[in-house]
Amino acid sequence: MRARLVAGSGALAYELLTRLSEGDRPVVAVSDEAEWLEAVTENVPDATVHHGDPTEPSTFGVVETEIESVLAFADDPARTAGIVPATAEAFPDALRIAYLGSGDADARAAIERDADRVVDPATATKAAITDRLSEAGSRFRNLRHVFAGIESPLSIVMHDNPDPDAIASALALARLANLAGLSAELCYYGSIAHQENRAFVNLLDIELTNLEAGDDLSPFGGFALVDHSRPGVNDQLPVETPVDVVIDHHPPREPVEAAHVDLRSDVGATSTLLVEYLQQSAIEIDETVATALLFGIRVDTDEFRREVCQADFEAAAALLPAANLGTLQRIENPSMSPETVETIGHAIRNRTRHGPVVITGVDDIQDRDALAQAADRLLNIEDVTTTLVYGITDGTIHVSARTRGADLDIGEALRDAFGAIGSAGGHADMAGAQIETGSFEATGFEADERPLVEIVDEIVTDRFLDVLEARWNRQIRAGTGEQYHVEGEDGGRDVFVFPPDVESIDD
């Protein structure tokens, strides 16, 4: 693995070595000051040290590791000006970064001429102060303050059946908690069934704790929520659970209470927010975290095509150098289980179309994430703008919906349709809901002898279409004319509604 080399001496060079040693690349130190090298050897054990004059190219002949970057940092600009050309001769392909220092104008000019990049103390100090006084700096300081008041371990809770954005965000927050001396567990309820998500967790070797409703939570010293914002809503925490930290990019419908709350719905992924915190912490983002966060941003923004903003692009650019793109490729091409294929096929065959809307249900699902995949695929049908797919398992109805176009916020539509009898929410173009079948009493519907799937279909379809018709101010189902069911070749039913003066499909 290519290494980073620090040539010079002084307090700043020592601090650089300390920070660089926390990263995932080897570090090498070269100096002719024996006491400085002794301090490095004692306190930065992972660094390889060599004694010699760093202004002489021959000194670097003892460095056997391939060098990717050289940091020329000495307190005296004249000495730095000598180090830069010496390292350029020894490592011509390496990136050269040099510290300008203050004083000697000729030496500073020579450094600026020979180095690829320079660090100007006046500019760096101003930028650091400005950054720390910014909103980002204030958020990071508050998070660190909250961490200081929590006893280990911290439970970082993702939403039920977590997606890559939630998992990556939890992993990054755990790194920040560890930096504050706080141990953390990445917790979730439900399952990780989607084949990409399983590959994501397995290939990155992310350790997760699968909780079940009713588990004893007393061993945890604190709770943090990522990618959702309220206990008991899209997770199975008791609603009265005291929450210390909330970081989420979904717009809340009700006030959120926690010691640290960061809700920003103007970004495409919670992972983007965590990149900012990591940058504020000044620790180097390791390969696993960088790969996870980059995948989280890509998935939640649909490869930068959905609800994306400048911050998402900047976060991805910051992660790219450290991320393992080979691992990402392996994550994105997992095998699909027979159960997933069967669920998607059943959903497609069982569809019913109401104008631009397709609704379909699957009884007794094995793979909840297959519902979202089916909703995505059905959206490819010509002239279809909105899809809703539901499935039933263990007395719970899981709903996944998609839409395209600017005239419908599907997250708000699901909240209006199912919020009173379950939990629902999401983005403008993709959302989900969960409904306990026992809550049907709230609908005023009197159960009959029909199969459960028929009862569910009627309630889900009626409530969803009621909301859409109210939002669109037009009828999209039978009522203004005759309803025709056209059987497709795959068995799916496309439903068309015609006004009274149209007598047949041919008309």
Image (spheres, grey):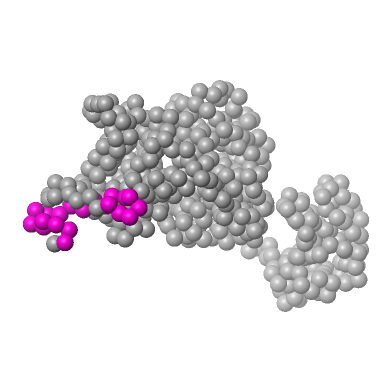
* Vertical comparison of 150 with 27: above or below: above
**Residue for point 27% across, 36% down:** 459
The image quarter in which residue 239 lies: top left
The image shows residue 335 at horizontal and vertical percentages of 56, 50
In the depicted view, which residue is nearer to us: 250 or 292? Answer: 292
> Which image quarter is the C terminus in?
bottom left
Of residue 492 and residue 132, the one placed in the foreground of this image is 492
Looking at the image, residue 261 lies above or below residue 37: above
Image x and y of residue 418, in percent: 31, 37
Check if residue 421 falls in the magenta segment: no
Q: In this view, does 454 lie above or below 106?
A: above
Answer whether residue 56 is visible to the viewer in this image. yes
Which residue shows up at 73% across the image and 72% down it?
Answer: 115
Q: Which residue lies furthest to the front in this view?
A: 489
Q: Which segment is the magenta one?
A: 487-506
Q: In which quarter of the image is the N terminus?
A: bottom right
* Image location (x, y in percent) of residue 316: 56, 58
- What residue is drawn where x is 25% and y is 47%? 468
Left or right of 243? Residue 106 is right
In the image shown, does 250 or 346 lie closer to the viewer? 346
